[in-house]
Amino acid sequence: MPRKKEETKSKDTVFASIKLTKEEYGKLEEMKKEAEKKGIRLTFKDIINKAFQKGIELAEKEIEEIKKERKKSGKKN
């Protein structure tokens, strides 16, 4: 019998998978254990989402800096 599709899933959500090396996976495990020691329960999804958000913020800042430099030098785009 096929499973029923969950009604709570948003149509705006896109699912993606990631590949991790053993070293990267080990770092995630360490972060998870550190959080548990502090009484915080985190999942890999929580950790990866936070890291991804930080990466986006960092990229946006770098783009703004590049735009400012180009305005000063008179280059377009």
Image (tube, rainbow, N blue to C red):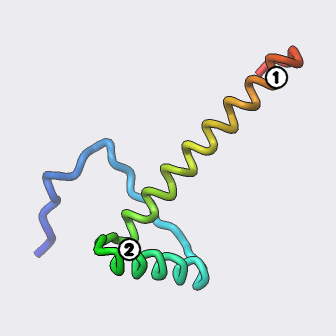
- Residue 71 horizontal/vertical position (percent): 80, 17
CA separation in Å, label 1 and label 2: 42 Å
Quick check: 18 left or right of 75?
left
Quick check: 4 left or right of 16?
left
Q: Secondary structure at mark 2?
A: helix
**Type of amino acid under label 1:** Arg
Q: Depth check: give the residue in front, 6 or 47.
A: 47
Q: Which residue is mark 2?
A: 35
Which one is earlier in the sequence, the residue at label 1 or at label 2?
2
Compared to residue 77, the image places residue 58 above or below, namely below
Compared to residue 2, the image places residue 60 above or below, namely above
Q: Residue at x 55, y 42 (%)?
A: 57
Q: Which residue is mark 1?
A: 70
- Residue 41 horizontal/vertical position (percent): 29, 72
For this orientation, the residue located farthest to the front is 38
Quadrant (top left, top right, bottom left, bottom right) of the N terminus: bottom left
Q: Depth check: give the residue in front, 16 or 71.
A: 71
- Residue 20 horizontal/vertical position (percent): 56, 75
Compared to residue 60, the image places residue 55 above or below, namely below
Query: Is label 1 or label 2 in front?
Result: 2
Q: Depth check: give the residue in front, 44 or 12.
A: 44
For this orientation, the residue located farthest to the right is 73
- Residue 52 horizontal/vertical position (percent): 51, 54
Compared to residue 56, the image places residue 51 above or below, namely below
Q: Residue at x 43, y 57 (%)?
A: 49
**Type of amino acid under label 2:** Ala
